[in-house]
Image (cartoon, helix red, strand yellow):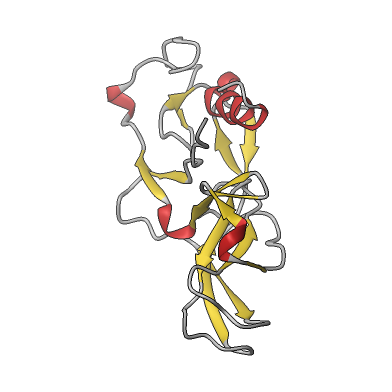
C-alpha cells in the first residue's frame, strides 16, 4: 500500500492574511549529491524536507523558511537521496514546507450549525473556526488547541480534525 502524504494545511480568515514564518540556517556538513535534502520535524507533527542545491559544497550555508509554530523547532538533519523511499523517511511520511494549503474560514451565515454536533448557533452557542479545516464549530466540539503551521501560538482545532489526525497516526484511516 502506497503511503499517503500528510496534508500540511492551516486555515486563515482572510486570503491576504500574512503567514508567520521562521527562518532556519543550515550548514552543509558533507558533499551533497542530487536528491539530497534537509529534514526538520515540525512541532505540528509534519516531517518537512527541503531539497539542497546540487552545487552546494561542504560548509555552504543555506536558509530555509518554515511556517511558525508554538513549539520549538528541532535541529535540522541531512537526508541522503537513498533514504527517501516512497515519500517517507524512516517510515514517516514527509511533505515540503512549500505545500502549505490555505483554507479559508466558512462565513457564519453559510453554516448556521456546528459541523461536528449539528447544533444550531445562537445567543448562547457561538461560532468558532477550526484553524485546520476552517469550518464553524461550537466550543464543546473544539476544545483542543494545537500547533498549526503559520501561527506562533496554539490554535483551536475541531474534534473531527483531531480524530482524523489520530486515526492517520495509528493507521486506521
Q: Quadrant of residue 146?
A: top right
Measuring from the top left, give residue 1's x and y in whole percent. Answer: 52, 30
Q: Residue furthest front?
A: 82
Q: Is residue 83 above or below residue 124?
A: below
Which residue is at the front of the view, 58 or 155?
58
Measuring from the top left, give residue 8's x and y in whole percent. Answer: 48, 46
Q: Residue at x 44, y 17 (%)?
A: 114
Q: Residue at x 55, y 69 (%)?
A: 36
Measuring from the top left, give residue 168's x and y in whole percent. Answer: 59, 29
Which residue is at the front of the view, 116 or 81?
81
Q: Quadrant of residue 156?
A: top right
Q: Quadrant of the C terminus?
A: top right
Measuring from the top left, give residue 161's x and y in whole percent. Answer: 53, 28
Q: Residue at x 68, y 62 (%)?
A: 73
Which residue is at the front of the view, 123 or 163?
163
How many labels sit on residues? 0
Q: Is residue 7 above or below residue 173?
A: below
Which residue is at the front of the view, 45 or 114?
45
* Position of residue 54 in the picture relative to residue 94 (left or right): left
Q: Residue at x 55, y 26 (%)?
A: 164
Q: Is residue 150 above or below residue 26?
A: above
Amino acid at each position: 500500500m502506497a503511503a499517503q502524504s500528510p496534508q500540511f494545511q492551516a486555515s486563515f480568515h482572510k486570503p491576504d492574511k500574512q503567514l508567520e514564518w521562521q527562518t532556519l540556517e543550515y550548514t552543509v556538513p558533507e558533499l551533497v549529491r542530487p536528491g539530497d535534502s534537509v529534514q526538520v520535524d515540525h512541532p505540528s507533527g509534519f516531517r518537512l524536507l527541503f531539497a539542497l542545491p546540487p552545487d552546494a559544497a561542504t560548509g555552504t550555508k543555506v536558509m530555509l523558511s518554515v511556517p511558525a509554530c508554538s513549539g520549538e523547532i528541532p535541529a535540522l538533519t541531512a537526508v541522503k537521496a537513498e533514504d527517501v523511499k516512497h515519500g517517507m523517511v524512516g517510515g514517516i511520511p514527509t511533505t515540503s514546507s512549500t505545500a502549505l494549503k490555505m483554507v479559508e474560514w466558512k462565513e457564519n451565515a453559510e453554516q448556521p450549525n456546528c459541523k461536528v454536533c449539528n447544533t444550531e448557533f445562537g445567543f448562547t452557542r457561538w461560532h468558532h473556526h477550526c484553524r485546520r479545516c476552517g469550518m464553524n464549530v461550537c466550543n464543546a466540539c473544539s476544545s483542543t488547541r494545537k500547533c498549526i503551521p503559520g501561527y506562533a501560538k496554539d490554535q483551536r482545532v475541531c474534534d473531527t480534525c483531531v480524530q482524523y489526525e489520530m486515526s492517520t497516526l495509528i493507521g486506521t484511516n
